[in-house]
Image (cartoon, rainbow, N blue to C red):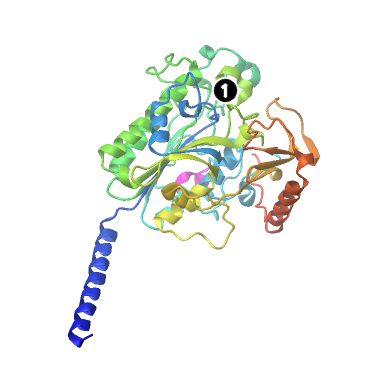
Amino acid sequence: MTTTKAHRKLYFFVSILSCLFFNNTLISQDSKPTNFVIIFADDLGYGDLGTFGNPTIKTPNLDKMAHEGQKWTNFYAGASVCTPSRAAILTGRLPVRSGMASNKQRVLFPDSKYGLPANEITLAEQLKTVGYNTACIGKWHLGHKKQYLPTNNGFDYYFGIPYSNDMDRIQGEEYKNYWERSNDSIKTEHFNVPLLRNTEIIERPADQNSITTRYSNEAVSYIKKHKNKPFFVYLAHNLPHVPLFASKDFLGKSERGLYGDVLEEIDNGVGKILETLQKEGLAENTIVVFTSDNGPWLPFKLNGGSAGPLKAGKGTTWEGGMREPTLFWGPGQIKPGTIMDIGSTMDLFTTFSKIAGVEIPKDRVIDGVDLSPTLFKREESPRKNMFYYRGTEIYAVRSENYKAHFVTQGAYGQFGEREEHDPPLLYNLGEDPSEQFNIAEKHPDVLESINELIDQHRSKLIKGKDQLADRE
């Protein structure tokens, strides 16, 4: 080969590389950061959405999310009750690590002394390090005092109630009797729950008749206002937790009664958010997630939801207590389909951090894994197991399709007293999601493997100081 030809080939090769580098640089400069929206329901059952099989509740916008995005059928909350579950989704950690799980008090109350420890890192704090605007809208339930509120935990803006909508009850009968009555007799003013904007009370009692639509409208307003910078919106509805309330536009419209009215109003708000993202040209670089903090509050009959084929509900470590209907939507990013792999709300911390280019903290155990290969490429989920804690104790463990129950206990008067199992109960959730057929005798090897998993987990576990037990 002559020198001239060699030079020409070298020049051509360098030119191609330069063009590729230049074009990639342009693509990198022009590409927009991904926005994140989490819509978190309260006490929603696995069987309460149309896309998850409910025959009488209309959820067209959530159905749209499922059709255009991903529907996860084995997705778990971090706990089976409010406070620890909310700690888990925002920190990416099992709540036992942060002290946001307790054997004395299962959730925080209006007279609780403490809340989410200041040394915990929230997803909002993660994203703010790379310039995200952050908003928390709805139910917080991680501490009502000023130092524990969202604005001291990474959120620029807060509009919502600081704890559950059934707290601060100032009128009515004994709790159980009260809820067994017709909801016609339940008034929003029976609950002196405050509505806050940032750290100031702007309404007390909060008008819960209109609160669902107001939350959705706040989310839409925040998105429009901050559309030119990356944003993270955490919209945590305080419904369908009892007491149930719906606005005039939705009251009496669902075949499922008041519970259906509530969900159809939530679905309508989801539609507003998706429409806003599309109209503002944000849909292609925004990921929206819809899930719930725990399963349905079954003792309240028609005022509670349904776990569908799953056993039990809120407060338990049966599947109905922690497995949640979950949807991911992001046109152009999320590869559509039904995902039967395991996922958890704790994984959102790690996944969104990775997508945003934020380093995962190395000074603490993060229990979340990165689901982005599954979301973007439909690759197998890296999550292979799930620990089911009740307070600070492991009640059950899932490994692949097998789930072992070491302790079972009902909640709120349903599904039995505490019972320890030796040998543990064992179910194949792929074949038996209703947890009906104990197969422990046939699979001692599986139980041995799960016990090894627990030993490994406990060997590195440092429990946080109990933040829930002390009350004033």
Tell me what residue is drawn at x 71 percent, y 27 percent.
415
State which quarter of the image contains the N terminus: bottom left
> In the picture, which quadrant includes the C terminus?
top right
Q: Is residue 292 visible?
A: yes
Magenta region, mostly helix, strand or loop?
helix
Which region is colored magenta? 145-151
- Which residue carries the number 1 mark? 304
Residue 337, quarter of the rendered image = top left
Asked whether 222 or 114 is in front, the reply is 222
Residue 451 drawn above or below residue 12 = above
Q: Residue at x 63, y 46 (%)?
A: 400
Where in the figure is residue 47, as x and y percent of width and height?
Answer: 54, 27
In the rendered image, which quarter is residue 329 located in? top left
Residue drawn at (70%, 45%) of the image: 394
Instruction: Determine the residue positioned at 52% across, 32% down.
Output: 42
Residue 408 or residue 154, whichever sits in front? 408
Classed neighbour count for the residue bearing mark 1: other residues with Cα under 10 Å, few (<14), some (14–19), many (≥20): many
Q: Amino acid at mark 1?
A: Gly
List x then y, in percent, for residue 355. Answer: 41, 54
Q: Between residues 375 and 379, which one lies in front from this camera angle? A: 379
Residue 234 shows in the view: no
